[in-house]
Image (tube, grey):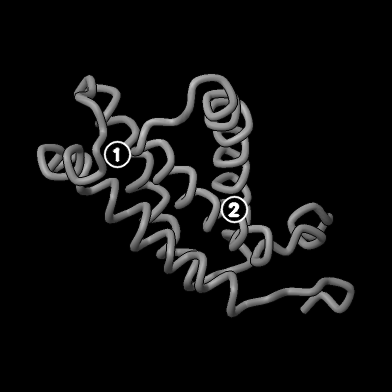
Amino acid sequence: MYKDTKIRLGWLKFMYFYTIVGAGGFGLGMIFVPGVILPAFRFPAQDPVVLGIVGSSYVAFGLASVLGLRAPLKFAPLLLLQLTYKIIWSIVVAIPLLLSKGLPVHAILLLVIFSTYIIGDLIAVPFSYVFSRHE
């Protein structure tokens, strides 16, 4: 393995599992039982096309994370992508709304959940490995 790189395989595998259960499960719910998911999380009514795209994306993260359990380092960029979009959403969407007019309940819940992924991914992703050259 790479001697100069601190790799936390346990954290990597945990974050893949968390993504399978959390994002994958939530995405399946958004696609197949939106009538249960939307009220449960107090989401407003959504365009079914957009809801399907978001749900499909979450399912894709969950399915790719299954592969990450088998090859944690190879799929670390998946967690980096997850980390990046959650940070962007938090900074560009959630925080400005929070500071201007407040967040609706469903957005607060998403911000809390996203924060757990952000913290976990920051711990798990071996940045020096991901950004190094290896052939």
* Left or right of 86, for residue 60: left
How many neighbours does mark 1 have within 10 angstroms: few (below 14), some (14-19), or many (20 or more)? many
**Quadrant placement of the N terminus:** bottom right
Would you identify the image quadrant in which residue 103 lies? Answer: top left
Q: 104 or 33: nearer the eye?
A: 104
- Residue sitting at x 79%, y 74%: 6
Q: Residue furthest right?
A: 4
Q: Earlier in the sequence, mark 2 or mark 1?
A: 1
**Quadrant placement of the C terminus:** bottom right
How many neighbours does mark 2 have within 10 angstroms: few (below 14), some (14-19), or many (20 or more)? many
* Left or right of 58, for residue 97: right
Q: 1 or 7: nearer the eye?
A: 7
* Disc on res. 55: 1
* Disc on res. 118: 2
Q: Nearer the viewer, mark 2 or mark 1?
A: 2
Would you identify the image quadrant in which residue 65 lies? Answer: bottom left
Label 2: element kind: helix
Q: Give the image location of residue 132, x and y in percent.
A: 83, 56
* Left or right of 11, for residue 35: left
Would you identify the image quadrant in which residue 125 lies? Answer: bottom right
- Residue sitting at x 73%, y 74%: 7
